Image (cartoon, helix red, strand yellow):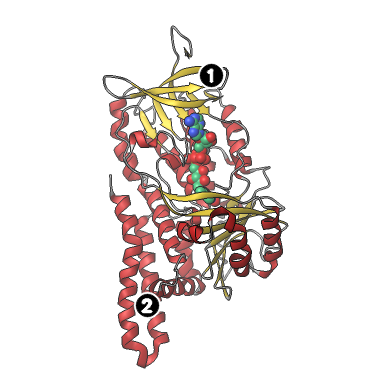
Amino acid sequence: MSSETPNHPQVHDVLIIGAGVAGCGVAQAFAKQGRRILVVERSLKEPDRIVGELLQPGGMDALARLGLSECVQDIGATPVEGYHLYWKGEEEATFWFCPPSDSAPSGSRSCGADEAETPSGRSFHHGKFVGKLRRRIAREENITLVEATALEILREARTGAVIGAKCSTGRDGDTINYLAHLTILADGSGSNFRSQFTACRPQAQSRFWGLELLDADLPFHNYAYGVIGSGPPMLMYQISPRETRILIDIPNTVYAEIGGSRGVPAYIRDRVAASVPDSVKPSLRDAVDRGRLRSMPNAWVPSTQNRTPGLVVLGDAANMRHPLTGGGMTVALKDAILLSRLLDPAEIPSLEDSGAVLRRMSTFHWRRKMHAASLNILAQALYLLFVTEGNPRLQIMQTGFVRYIQAGKENFAEPVAIMGGIVENPLRLFYQFVRIAVYSVQIHLRQAGLLGFPRALAQSFLVFVRAVGIILPSILAELKA
Ligand SMILES: Cc1cc2nc3c(=O)[nH]c(=O)nc-3n(C[C@H](O)[C@H](O)[C@H](O)COP(=O)(O)OP(=O)(O)OC[C@H]3O[C@@H](n4cnc5c(N)ncnc54)[C@H](O)[C@@H]3O)c2cc1C
């Protein structure tokens, strides 16, 4: 084993483990403050994954605040102005981040005075985006990016404080100890070290199965698509001029019933293909035949407050939500900005002062709720709402949700702004959730007529109980320290 410089090991201000979206974002945020950063990444090859391909408008804004906007340029990214929802193969609903204004010229958006202010997301190849982030941060004078795998988190024997990481450089089994005043663990959803610092374990009820559709004939440009109500929930968005990602949610119970991974292609052909728009069916069948099916668990990990001196856990290593609403990268980038602000050198000149850093961790834990809790709760709640599995109460709410969105921008503007990471306020999410529950019940009672009214009233009560059951566990998880 060797150390960086055996007699005088260099101690960095910050050591970041993992150069994904969270690691690159936080490296850039700290570098802008003049801190000296070392980032270790186990593979600097362009990632080839089915995750992190749609960046919400709130994430785009965070990227701009970090000075990283160029990373979504020249990667074949597609603007995402809103969502188009297919429901039960019969009905559709469109909702925009920036709804068309009645007074604006036809088709134009009312939100920003000019196009640059109009909120929109981007969808792209995850690997191309991360590749650009890495090249961009490596250009910063005070960031060093090295290819190395963290093997062990180093701790001071007496205090237990984290002082860096033992890493393998992959050359002849060489290892090196990288030391830092603050170590940021940003090693992603499969973090090898998370369990040393938090009792929360990832829980996943389903996996997303991903395919790349070639030259799919999408009905509209610049939208992400959701397919719900008839079979598994699905997402589609363009990731390059010719490729469209489709993600199909297969619950673990269904996966077992269809005989595991060997049953997935047939399941998609027989069960899923029927629900996608007709124009997309040929490219879906082609993609299944080409056979490059990949999957990822849709895990949930509630965040916990960091209490280990010398360490911060960030990104998916710290907190995950169902990826249905595409919020993970937005949360990671906003966390990076907030963390660097709370540890601003003007207030904490040296990160060696681990007591001062730890005190800031409590503020970080609670203040990040504004942007993270809204996206976390929304993702979990929408997922439960979209997988009704024949549950009549959930079906009443799903109908209510679709009708609510269809009723126009007065209704959909705020929910979509929360989903886009534009509105950061869990209370507004709660308010919208209650409105949708009430709306669902009103529709149900109206449809029941006079004779069916007493039964519908009893069902409505159960709808409310179910609604509370959907949202309460996520809220309680967010309230834990
Ligand atoms: C199916 C699916 C679809 C998703 N779609 C979206 C979406 O559309 N939009 C969105 O915003 N979010 C989406 N997400 C979530 C999003 O991908 C994550 O929130 C985001 O990638 C988290 O970034 P991260 O940097 O924390 O982790 P990662 O991107 O996983 O980065 C972790 C990095 O750490 C490195 N690493 C790991 N271990 C070590 C080690 N021991 N030493 C050194 N390096 C190491 C890895 O190589 C990797 O580069 C999706 C998630 C899933 C599962």
**Is 346 or 390 nearer to us in this picture?**
390
Q: Quadrant of the C terminus?
A: top left
Residue 257, percent from left and from top: 50, 61
Q: Which residue is mark 2?
A: 441
Name which residue type carries label 2: Val
From what the image shows, is residue 219 above or below residue 362?
below
Element on which disc 2 rests: helix
Q: Residue furthest front?
A: 259
Residue 80, percent from left and from top: 60, 56
How packed mark 1 is, by other alpha carbons closer than 10 Å (few <14, some 14-19, many 20 or more), is: few
**Is 231 or 470 nearer to us in this picture?**
231
In the image, is 212 to the left or to the right of 102? right
Q: Is residue 329 visible?
A: no
From what the image shows, is residue 417 above or below residue 149?
below
Q: Which residue is mark 1?
A: 173
Element on which disc 1 rests: loop
